[in-house]
Image (cartoon, rainbow, N blue to C red):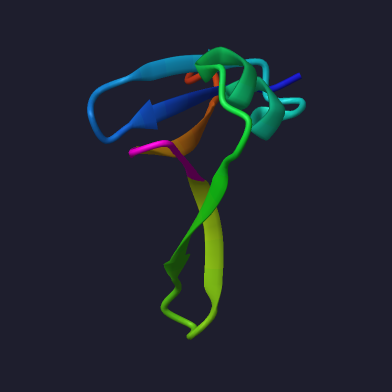
Amino acid sequence: MKTMLALGHLGTRISLKGEHPRKELMEALGAKHIGKIYVDTLGGGIKHVGYVVAREWFTLYAITEWVGK
């Protein structure tokens, strides 16, 4: 199971289990509708990076363990 962080442009932070991030984000915010956010890639394509809920957009980040030396 991977943990995810939904970081809103207004500073909202929501921790997600990561199995169904769209559904979890909608439940956390009490939303019924949600839109996808895309960014352009250097190769000329597009990549899905987050969601728009009401007037705030959220970028999703996968949280992984970092082990230093």
Q: Is any part of residue 68 visible from this angle?
A: no
Residue at x 56%, y 17% (from the top left corner) = 30
| Quadrant position of residue 41 | bottom left
* Picture quarter with the N terminus: top right
Q: Is residue 69 left or right of residue 19?
A: left
Q: Position of residue 22 (x, y in %)?
A: 65, 34
Residue at x 26%, y 35% (from the top left corner) = 9
Residue at x 48%, y 20% (from the top left corner) = 66
Is 48 situated above or below 7? below
Q: Front-most of 7 and 32?
A: 32
Residue at x 49%, y 36% (from the top left corner) = 60
Residue 52 within the segment the image draws in magenta: yes
Q: Position of residue 67 (x, y in %)?
A: 48, 17
Q: Position of residue 48 (x, y in %)?
A: 56, 57
Q: Is any part of residue 29 visible from this angle?
A: yes
* Picture quarter with the C terminus: top left
Is 1 situated above or below 40? above
Is 50 situated above or below 38? above
Magenta segment: 51-55
Q: Front-most of 51 and 42?
A: 51
Is 55 situated above or below 49? above
Check the image and name the residue furthest to the front.
32
Q: Is residue 48 left or right of residue 52?
A: right
Residue 30 within the segment the image draws in magenta: no
